[in-house]
Image (cartoon, rainbow, N blue to C red):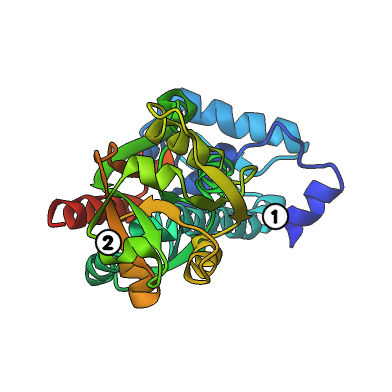
């Protein structure tokens, strides 16, 4: 293209803007500066000055001027076709970019902690799928810490987490509590506790405890410290696993007992017995987390679905 060629040759310098080209095309098409000025909503002197600035920049005349009209020079005619093409390309580029910027994402990445959300997550997903059938939710089974880190670095848009005991740890993200779960103890079906409905916390503390890996789930041990804070005898952690699936396998095998949410029974069925503790510990809080600031419409809809599902829990 002619215009591209003269750009490469250095004839069309950096001072030439798309505005200059739009003004030139308008004048060339109307063959009259006054009418072009009215169309462009600029003054006639300002329009004439912009055209002369363009000619000065490229080093040759584009128009032959008479008292009442203007005509294209041969160079002007060659320049006109390419100027139109360049403006059209610029308009198309803006249109495409605007469409991309305003388009809704087709995927929503959500991190979650499986055990406390086992009962409510399917309800959230069903409600969201009805509201946003064209959006695919990709779930990521990560630790609470990894979920929050994923929100911070953009790998995740939302997360369902048990928050850290220090609320200040979430100062740089958006967090809202959505529901609570009772704290319970899980035991093997053949364990002596299994014949009961409730177990005193002093007896739970005397049992070998199966826990999550300390380096991956530090908040879990913060909760254990709070739960057993008033007891002289603290529980002894005999094994650590990186998921509740591993913990439940160890509990089922009779290695020890485990502290977790009431939803352990929902997740693992008759593999273990889930019993209430007396006195009952403070419930586990479960909330939704996202990046600070305004959520995308898709993320906001999932957020609202989570709150609505929790209100019906």
User: In the drawing, does residue 178 fall left or right of residue 112?
Assistant: left
Q: Is residue 174 above or below residue 109?
A: above
Q: Residue at x 59, y 42 (%)?
A: 153
| Picture coordinates of residue 242, whole percent (x, y) | 60, 57
State the SS at label 2: loop
The one of 178 and 264 positioned closer to us in this rendering? 264
| Picture coordinates of residue 124, whole percent (x, y) | 27, 62
The one of 235 and 299 positioned closer to us in this rendering? 235
Q: Is residue 118 visible?
A: no
Picture quadrant where residue 287 is located = top left
Q: Is residue 279 above or below residue 45?
A: below
Considering only order in the chain, which callout, 1 or 2, is on the residue closer to the N terminus? 1
| Picture coordinates of residue 299, whole percent (x, y) | 35, 52
Determine which residue is flagged by label 2: 120
Q: Calculate the distance from the C-alpha at mark 2 to the C-alpha at mark 1.
A: 73 Å
Q: Residue at x 47, y 50 (%)?
A: 207
| Picture coordinates of residue 85, whole percent (x, y) | 60, 60
Q: Outermost residue toward the right?
A: 9
Q: Outermost residue toward the left?
A: 312
């Amino acid at each position: 293209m002619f215009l591209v060629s003269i750009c490469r040759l250095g004839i069309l310098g950096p001072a030439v803007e798309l505005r200059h080209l739009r003004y030139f095309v308008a004048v060339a098409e109307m063959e009259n500066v006054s009418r072009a000025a009215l169309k462009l909503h600029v003054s006639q002197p300002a329009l004439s000055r912009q055209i002369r600035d363009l000619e000065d920049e490229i080093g040759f005349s584009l128009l032959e001027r008479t008292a009442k009209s203007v005509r294209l020079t041969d160079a002007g005619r060659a320049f006109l076709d390419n100027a139109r093409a360049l403006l059209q390309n610029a308009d198309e580029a803006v249109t495409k970019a605007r469409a991309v910027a305003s388009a809704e994402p087709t995927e929503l990445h959500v991190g979650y902690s499986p055990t406390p959300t086992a009962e409510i997550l399917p309800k959230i997903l069903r409600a969201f799928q009805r509201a946003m059938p064209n959006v695919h939710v990709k779930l990521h089974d990560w630790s609470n810490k990894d979920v929050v880190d994923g929100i911070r670095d953009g790998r995740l848009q939302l997360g369902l987490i048990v928050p850290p005991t220090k609320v200040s740890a979430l100062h740089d993200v958006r967090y809202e509590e959505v529901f609570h779960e009772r704290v319970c103890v899980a035991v093997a079906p053949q364990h002596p506790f299994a014949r009961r409905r409730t177990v005193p916390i002093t007896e739970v503390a005397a049992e070998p405890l199966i826990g999550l890996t300390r380096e991956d789930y530090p908040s879990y041990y913060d909760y254990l410290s709070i739960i057993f804070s008033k007891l002289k005898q603290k529980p002894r952690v005999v094994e650590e696993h990186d998921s509740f699936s591993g913990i439940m396998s160890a509990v089922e095998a009779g290695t020890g007992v485990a502290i977790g949410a009431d939803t352990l029974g929902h997740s693992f069925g008759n593999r273990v017995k889930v019993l209430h503790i007396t006195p009952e510990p403070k419930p586990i809080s479960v909330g939704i987390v996202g990046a600070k600031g305004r959520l995308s419409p898709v993320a906001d809809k999932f957020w609202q679905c989570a709150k609505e599902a929790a209100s019906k829990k």
